[in-house]
Amino acid sequence: MMRQIFKLFGIAIAISAIVSCQPGGANGKSSSSSKKSAAEKAYVAPGEYDEYYGFLSGGFSGQVYTYGFPSARLLKIIPVFSQDPQSGYGYSEETKPMLQTSYGFIPWDDLHHPDISQTNGELDGRWIFANGNNTPRIARIDLQDFETQEIIEIPNSAGNHNSAFVTENTEYVVAGTRFGVPIPQKDMPIKDYKGNFKASMTFLSVDEDSGEMDIAFQIRLPGYNYDLAHPGRDKSHGWMFFTTYNTEEAHTLLEVNASKFDKDFITAINWKKAEEYVKEGKGTIEKTRYAHNKYDSQTHTATTEWKDEVLVLDPTELPGIVYFVPSAKSPHGVDVDPTGEYIVSNGKLSANLVVHSFSKIKEAVDNEEFVDEAYGIPILDFDNTLAGIVEQPGIGPLHTEFDERGNAYSTFFISSEIVKWDVKTQEVLDRIDVYYSPGHLSIPGGNSRKPDGKYLLSMNKITKDRYLPVGPEMNQPGQLIDISGDKMEMILDFPMIGEPHYASMIHADKIKDKSRKIYRLASENDHPMVVKSGKDVDITRDGKNVHVKMGMIRSHFNPDNIEGIKVGDKVHFHLTNTEQDFDIPHGFAVMGANNSEILVVPGQTKTLTWEPKEPGIYPFYCTDFCSALHQEMQGYIRVSPEDSDIELSWSLNKNIDG
Ligand code: K7E
Ligand code: CUA
């Protein structure tokens, strides 16, 4: 016991020593490789557009942040697994079903990896898929609306971390479990974990036209811990690779007990083979329960569909689907180069990077060169699958991305740097300090067949002295690095929000021209409570439920005086913004509402529910400064006692008689 504690201390001291000996504050040794200064490179003049979109995960904020690069201007916050008082997402009646799960309404999650859809191995800019790590879910954001349109819960999973990565034609989005757990869930002693807990890798199909997801199948695996995933591409298309740690199957003090074995695994899954088995009718249907939430942009309304079964493939009965490739100890990232040949495994505590060869893996599989098996799954030979080792590039490698010139870029958490190396020769070419401790990095298309290697975004975990202090917690620094030349050059340092893990970046041309401007009232609004013209304005009572169909246009609400509401009523404001002009939203807020304001974009309908508790006169107003007379965009609601006999009535520009 004593020895273990001492050992722990040793590790902690070693790590803190390495972290704290980094140079602080200003970086004096920035090398200017080109004629433009760093400031000029990151500068985007007023009125000009950025060249790239970057979609940064918010980690525990449950959101995605849209930035423009190279300026790092924040363009839009996209709520995903969160309630957002700005847009009303998760508060409006239409969007509440998006956050429904088998555990109930969950307005929070830990979002790590946004991944943009691909066609022929290139980013196509149609959708972003993102994972909810805590309550296993996958979301789809539409890049026409920049809104979350679908969230599907992942059953038989716990800690949905190796997600949401797409295959090169967006055939599948993968959702990999982090924790082993009993499947199906049950009450059992934790000490009996080993051999009894299980894990699931879930493959979700994606409809080519609508983007709609569906769970195609799950692969049941031993209950190790699985960390990250990336799809094969080009020559390795059809495969998916997952880092696998805690092959010791420890259930306590993992930092020691899951670091015993010299090697852990990359789990290589041949999903094309799995697909064949599915077509042959193989696999078992298991009973379960999960929510599938979809937003319909025609009715502006989300619905929850409850599903109760999932198709499970057992790789011990269906050979050829899963192989274990011994790899770096306690690996974190697994990254595949643009050719699909090199698979980089990043052992968190290691000073080397292990590079596997897909051709060699394939050959070993074809020749059945197995050295052992674990729970019935064949284990390949480490040396037989190795392409090479990047010797001593830094300490604590986490993630790697690629450019189109045959270079790889890896983050090193402990030695706080990014190292550039040659994928084929594994030779180190350049290195740059980042401040401090980078997690993921991102290059536009850097996890696709067609990288666009101009900029690299380093997402660092520790801030310390980078910015003016703001209390005990500092926003984490993002650092933009120009990688177009031989030497990497840091050009910008900016605070990010939440805890960004991965970000996906894409050239703006792939998105900007198809971005939605308005919902056409005539053809793109089938909401049952829509107000298309003044004659649709109406208020109806159904017992305690009062439905208000209200229009919004510069600069008034229709109606703006309402009487006959009583204490105990549930008032549903169905708000339609009847503007048909780009970028003219109206907001709605009523005094004492327990949810939020709501922002309605042109041609859209949204509903806010309000339950007045006391008699009185309640003002409501537009929250978004929409015209010179925005402050005139307001109204009153009269709330009477529960037993009052005042009739419902409403008006605009005339007195209510009563
Ligand atoms: Cu490395 Cu969740 Cu992708 Cu964080 S993970 S850094
Ligand atoms: Cu409408 Cu302000």
Image: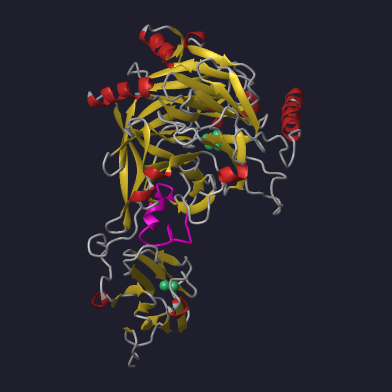
Predominant secondary structure, magenta span: loop
The correct choice, above or below, for 404 with respect to 461 in the image is above
Front-lying residue, 281 or 486: 486
Q: Which residues are magenta?
A: 82-104
User: Which quadrant holds residue 124?
Assistant: top left
Give the x, y percent position of residue 28: 73, 37
Is 94 in the magenta? yes
Residue 465 image point, x, y percent: 72, 45
Frontmost residue, 323 versus 74: 74
Ligand 2 positioned in quadrant = bottom left
| Colouring method of the image | secondary structure
Residue 385 x, y percent position in the rendering: 47, 12
Residue at point 49%, 74% (across, down):
592
Look at 46% across and 29% down and name the residue there: 229
Q: How many marks?
A: 0
Indicate whether 596 appears above or below 82: below
Q: In the orientation shown, which residue stands out farthest toward the bottom?
A: 658
The reply to whether residue 102 is visible in this rendering is: yes
* Residue found at x 75% / y 26%: 10
Seen in the picture, residue 603 relative to 319 is either above or below; the reply is: below
Residue 513 lies left or right of residue 109; in this view the side is: left
Horizontal relation, residue 414 to residue 77: left or right: right
Q: Magenta stretch: residue 125 in it?
A: no
Q: Inspect this view and state whether residue 546 appears.
A: no
Q: Position of residue 205 (x, y in %)?
A: 31, 35
- Camera-side residue: 110 or 403? 403
